[in-house]
Amino acid sequence: MLTHIGIDQHGKTYHLFSGFPRKELCEEHFPHMRVEKLYVDKINGTTRHIGYVFGGGGGIWVRLWNVGLWERRT
């Protein structure tokens, strides 16, 4: 089952099926590349971990999104 979707700065999508998105990205899409966490600053001054940077600061930035089941009551 699809658990996460990653989108890089160029708009390419990565469909991730395991519960471990970093591991899956490292093994299947970016083998042998350095990995760092990607953070964003919020308006209230806190920071949030939102994805990963592969290949150092000038590499590929992948933002992760959770995928969940959505149901509507009828």
Image (cartoon, grey):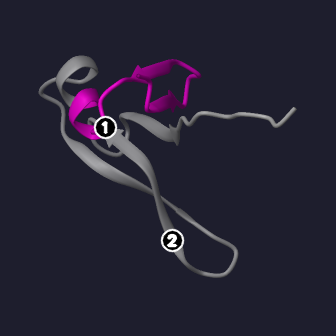
Under mark 1, the amino acid is Gly
Q: Quadrant of residue 52?
A: top left
In this rendered view, identify the residue nearer to me: 67 or 15: 67
Under mark 2, the amino acid is Thr
What are the residue bounds of the magenta stretch? Answer: 1-25
Give the residue displayed 44% in from the left and 24% down from the top: 2
Judging by the rendered image, the residue that carries numbered circle 2 is 47
Crowding at mark 2 (Cα within 10 Å: few <14, some 14-19, many 20+):
few
Q: Please give the label number shown on residue 66.
A: none
18 in the magenta segment:
yes
Left or right: 50 as drawn, with respect to 26: right
Mark 1: which secondary structure? loop
x, y percent for residue 60: 40, 32
Q: Quadrant of residue 54?
A: top left
Going from N to C along the chain, the mark reached first, 1 or 2, is 1
Compared with residue 47, is residue 13 higher up or lower down, i.e. above or below?
above
